């Protein structure tokens, strides 16, 4: 049977799995029951695996030769969201919800494992299955790759993100930048406190912080190439204790999003320069803590072409859709930093099935028909990559 037919055959298996995982959502890096269920399914399938860290699982399916290897990845953590979908398989863990589709990712990869294990004698290489914890915190990929690195062991990587803005039956595997970096900045401004009626005796950290917020926006508008893109957001500004006291300190926190490492470097340098010089202008002192959390996700062009052919085999040319890059972040970037790969966006939107709410929403849901397509794509891409 072709992979397309096998995916249809195991559709109910994957839907039932997804609903089981949906009922047991767990926090990042604490996915104990989820990990246990994954290992149970792999045992049933007779697929060898190893535990990585507290909750990560890496399984291997060996084909007829070991000349080439592909890594398939699914993330497994949930969110601190109280579910309001009303579905019969709602979360049993109060205050936790699979509101980003990771329950679907795990299930599709297990479904793909079932398919690939069934046709392993035809595989022109090996497939490694990475069930990764902690994506929502941006720390899971690094933790699992530290123990099971791709470099020198694997030739390529592939992952799927079910996506609520794409109609079911449509898949995007566009080449180039797909998701942004996500850096965190913390700015500490030191002024001089004083009485609100005597500003000449003080150095107002609120005023200095306000100037810093405004000046930082000039980086995107006046220092970056207009055809490039980036975001600098200050989301937290804490200063002062009382209406008539000039604050001696201000702490600003925010995020930076870019689509290239070059832009990432440039923005970091610009932020540090502007904070320093703005503070000096107002006689204050400023320091910047710049934390690089997640790099951009950039699809390899050759791998994207392979993925397009894989989508065509499952859904025809009409199944391929173009989808604009976005400033959300994904720690699959660390897989792609080691080997070339693709992050595919598989559509789950269908208003007729109440699958029209955004990610991280308390009513987030999916058209489960997408699970068949995603399962098939994991398996088809693995076969096509190994044969390419």
Image (cartoon, grey):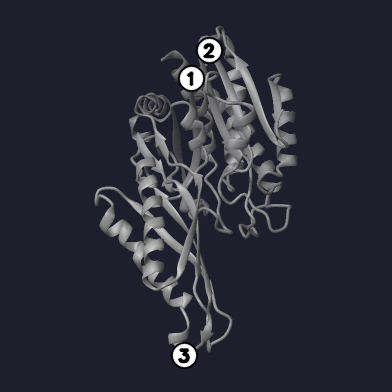
Above or below, 262 against 149 in this view is below
Judged by depth in the image, the label closer to the viewer, 2 or 3, is: 3
Is the residue marked by circle 2 packed among few (<14), some (14-19), or many (20+) residues within 10 Å?
Answer: many
Q: Secondary structure at mark 2?
A: loop
Residue 198 has which mark?
3
Above or below, 109 against 102 in this view is above
- Closer to the camera in the image, 237 or 27: 237
Visible in this render: residue 218? yes
Q: Residue at (51%, 9%) from the top-left corner? A: 67
Q: On the image, numbered disc 2 is attached to which residue? A: 125
| Image quarter hosting the C terminus | top left
Q: Quadrant of residue 106?
A: top right
Tell whether label 3 touches label 2 (CB within 8 Å).
no
Visible in this render: residue 10? no
Residue 139 has which mark?
none
N-term-proximal mark, 2 vs 1: 2
N-term-proximal mark, 2 vs 3: 2
In space, the residues marked 2 and 1 are separated at their CA atoms by 10 Å
Q: Residue at (47%, 64%) from the top-left corner? A: 286
N-term-proximal mark, 1 vs 3: 1
In space, the residues marked 1 and 3 are separated at their CA atoms by 67 Å
- Closer to the camera in the image, 349 or 267: 267
The image shows residue 16 at horizontal and vertical percentages of 66, 38
Tell whether label 1 touches label 2 (CB within 8 Å).
yes
Q: Residue at (52%, 45%) from the top-left corner? A: 367
Q: On the image, numbered disc 1 is attached to which residue? A: 155
Q: Quadrant of residue 41?
A: top right
Can you name the residue that lies furthest to the bottom here? 197
Q: Secondary structure at mark 3?
A: loop
């Amino acid at each position: 049977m072709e992979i397309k037919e096998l995916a249809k055959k195991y559709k109910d298996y994957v839907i039932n799995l997804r609903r089981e995982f949906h009922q047991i959502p767990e926090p990042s890096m604490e996915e104990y029951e989820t990990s246990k269920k994954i290992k149970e399914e792999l045992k049933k399938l007779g697929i060898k695996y190893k535990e990585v860290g507290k909750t990560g699982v890496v399984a291997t399916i060996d084909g007829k030769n070991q000349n080439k290897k592909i890594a398939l990845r699914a993330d497994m953590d949930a969110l601190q969201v109280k579910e309001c979908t009303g579905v019969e398989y709602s979360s049993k863990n109060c205050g936790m919800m699979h509101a980003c589709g990771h329950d679907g990712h795990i299930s599709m990869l297990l479904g793909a494992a079932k398919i690939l294990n069934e046709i392993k004698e035809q595989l022109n290489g090996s497939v490694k299955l990475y069930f990764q914890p902690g994506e929502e915190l941006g720390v899971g990929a690094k933790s699992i790759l530290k123990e099971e690195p791709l470099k020198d062991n694997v030739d390529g990587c592939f992952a799927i993100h079910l996506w609520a803005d794409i109609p079911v039956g449509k898949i995007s595997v566009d080449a180039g930048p797909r998701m942004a970096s996500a850096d965190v900045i913390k700015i500490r401004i030191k002024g001089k406190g004083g009485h609100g009626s005597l500003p000449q005796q003080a150095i107002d950290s609120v005023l200095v912080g306000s100037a810093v917020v405004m000046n930082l926006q000039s980086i995107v508008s006046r220092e970056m190439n207009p055809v490039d893109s980036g975001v600098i957001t200050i989301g937290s500004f804490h200063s002062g204790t009382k209406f008539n006291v000039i604050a001696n300190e201000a702490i600003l926190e925010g995020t930076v999003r870019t689509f290239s490492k070059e832009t990432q470097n440039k923005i970091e340098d610009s932020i540090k320069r502007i904070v320093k010089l703005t503070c000096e202008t107002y006689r204050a002192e400023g320091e910047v803590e710049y934390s690089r959390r997640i790099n951009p996700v950039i699809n390899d062009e050759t791998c994207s072409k392979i993925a397009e052919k894989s989508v065509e085999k499952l859904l025809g040319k009409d199944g391929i859709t173009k989808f604009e890059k976005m400033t959300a972040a994904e720690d699959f970037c660390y897989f792609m930093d080691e080997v070339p790969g693709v992050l595919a966006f598989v559509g789950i939107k269908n208003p007729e099935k109440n699958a029209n709410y955004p990610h991280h929403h308390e009513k987030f849901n999916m058209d489960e028909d997408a699970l068949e397509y995603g399962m098939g794509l994991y398996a088809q891409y693995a076969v096509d990559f190994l044969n390419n």
